[in-house]
Image (cartoon, rainbow, N blue to C red):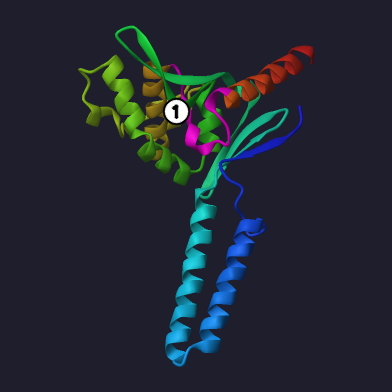
Amino acid sequence: MDTIHISNHHYSWHSPILRKSAAIAALVGFAIVLFSPNWQLSLLVVILLVIALSFTYYTLVKSRVTFTLTATHFQQHMFKGGWALRWSDIERIGICSHHHDGWHTPLPWIGLRINNYQAYLNAICPRIATDLLLSQRALLYLGLQQTSPQTTFEDIVLDSTPFIDTDGCEYHGLMAMLANRMTYQREFFGYDIFISEADLDRSGEKFVGLTRRYLAAADRDMFES
């Protein structure tokens, strides 16, 4: 399988839109400096334009999420870091759904069920783990309400109980919180890791179909070897 990269947007300094915007801002700044009777005011406007452009570029770079699919690995890259898993570490991939009174409603989340937590916990950086714990609280609350409404949400949202994986490796602190969160989410939704559909350049169904083809190809290669 070929290596492909999927991003929620492709804005970078090399993109035509950003280059045109920077050129227009430069022309505006030059015109202000050239025709303004007050050089202090024109300098202030130019500085504000530079700050606005820099902030816009920083915001775009910070919001970019990229996924890399190779023949052997599945990776997620974000501004603060990322993680990578071998396809052999992934059991299945699917659309997360909410069930109520026998009805299942798809949610804008892609779920990954993994074989061993150790591979993921050892691959993810602490800053990304913190972001996931905070940004996916609503998903945890929804799963709690549909599965165990009698459980207190505050008891599980940041559960720091030491976690011991199947190989006997013990995790504490932030990694224990993440591992416990994954355990709860598996109980609620059947998945351990979640990817927001907003971070994709295509529908969740198409992304799941694509990743399943890579997963099947990796399984086939492993069987043949």
Would you name the residue on which mark 1 appears?
A: 108
Q: Residue furthest top?
A: 102
* Depth order, front residue of 130/58: 58
Q: In which quarter of the image is the C terminus?
A: top right
The answer to which of 58 and 117 lies nearer the viewer is 58
Determine crowd level at label 1: few under 14, some 14-19, many 20+ residues with C-alpha closer than 10 A.
some
Callout 1, which amino acid?
Pro
Q: Residue furthest right?
A: 225
Which one is in front, 183 or 22? 22
Can you name the residue that lies furthest to the front here?
Answer: 35
- State the residue at coordinates (42%, 36%): 175
Residue 150 position in % (x across, y down): 20, 17
Please state the horizontal and vertical placement of residue 88, each as a whole percent of the image: 64, 21
Residue at figure coordinates x 67%, y 20% from the top left:
213
Q: Is residue 166 visible?
A: no
Q: Is residue 171 above or below residue 212?
A: below
* Secondary structure at numbered mark 1: strand
Name above or below for residue 134 compared with residue 116: below
In this rendered view, identify the residue nearer to me: 61 or 132: 61
Q: What stretch is highlighted in magenta?
A: 190-205
- Say whether residue 31 is magenta: no
On the image, the x and y values in percent for residue 52 come to 47, 67
* Residue at 46% over, 27% down: 109
| Position in image of residue 62 (x %, y %) | 50, 52
Q: What residue is drawn where x is 41% and y is 42%?
A: 131
Question: Which image quarter: residue 103?
Answer: top left
